[in-house]
Amino acid sequence: MTHRSHARSEEDMHEIDAKGVYYRVLNERVRAAMAAGHKDILLKNVNGQYYIGDGLRGGDVKITVEGVPGNDLAAFMDGPTIIVRGNAQDNIGNTMNGGKVVIHGNAGDVLGYGMRGGKLHILGDVGYRVGIHMKGYKKQTPVIVCGGGAGDFFGEYMAGGVLILLGLKEESGRPIAGDYLGTGMHGGVIFVRGDVDRTRCGAEVGITAPNDDDMKTLKECLTDFCNDFSLNLDSVMKKGFKKLSPASLRPYGNLYAY
């Protein structure tokens, strides 16, 4: 007599074809699949549909996206894991509360806006205003790790959490981050692999070498990131990092109060 393994297999995966499907209908089908008890969902032929995974709960649910999801992927999500096999657009993880989003390509602007918890792992480049107003909630510490480079305003108005910028695909003459790095930052921490150009940073940011506790945080975050993308942890950490943290808890206080 043979016994079926409890491990997930392709037979356990519930497929949904998103080709030509309106975003509201697609998201209703995802919710229906979860309500029916499916834990491993594959969305095929996704082409810009908005709001995939928004508000979903359930830490044992995995949603794999083939194609390019539209804006606000995983907004307000609390628990599931979303894996995107290619690129993704803007506003990923908007006010996300828990779970993980893993993107095997590049991603757009305003990732993790007001993010309260969970993780965003992006293998490639990201756009502008990544981590803006990222804050954390109670004991939760949101984490965004970007494998490539970033546009302007990385970590703008950041209030909590961890932002890590790796620049793994370095290009000669191209900075790892754009201008206004950490502008308005008043909480949390940014780690940048390699050197940081002070002229590109907000005036509110202090730049130091990571201490032992910082290195422990980095290793923990990057171990998970490297596992997601089959990268070598030692190779990623070998280059060294700079730590960016706020020099003031009220960077613009003098503009609004005497």
Image: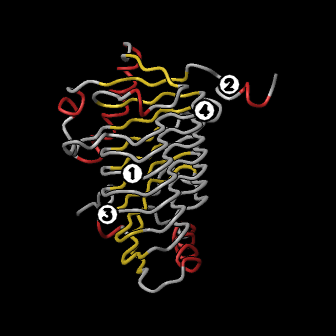
Check disc 1 and give the amino acid type: Val
Which residue does the numbered mark 3 point to in the structure image? 86
Position of the N terminus, as image quadrant, is bottom left
Indicate left or right for 233 with 140 as reference. left
Q: Which mark is residue 159?
A: 4
Residue 199 lies, with reference to residue 50, above or below; the image says above
Dot 3 amino acid type = Gly
In three-dimensional space, the C-alpha distance between marks 1 and 3, rounded to whole angstroms, equals 13 Å
Q: Earlier in the sequence, mark 3 or mark 2?
A: 3
- Gap in angstroms between the C-alphas marked 3 and 2: 39 Å
Q: Earlier in the sequence, mark 1 or mark 3?
A: 3
Amino acid type at mark 2: Arg
Q: How far apart are labels 1 and 4 at the CA level?
A: 20 Å
Q: Residues within 10 Å of mark 1 (few under 14, many from 20)?
A: many
Give the percent coordinates (x, y) of residue 240.
26, 24
Expressed as whole percent of the image width and height from the top left, the position of residue 247 reads 56, 19
Q: Which residue is mark 1?
A: 126
Give the image location of residue 155, x and y in percent.
50, 38
Relative to the observer, which residue lies in front, 44 or 67? 67
* Residue 129 coordinates in the image, percent (x, y): 51, 47
Residue sitting at the far bottom: 20
Task: State which tag comes first along the sequence, 1 or 2.
Answer: 1
Q: Residue at x 59, y 35 (%)?
A: 136
- Image quarter where the C terminus lies is top right
Q: Secondary structure at mark 4?
A: strand
Which of the 4 image quadrants contains residue 165? top left
Foreground: disc 1 or disc 3: 1
Q: Report whether 37 appears left or right of 223.
A: right
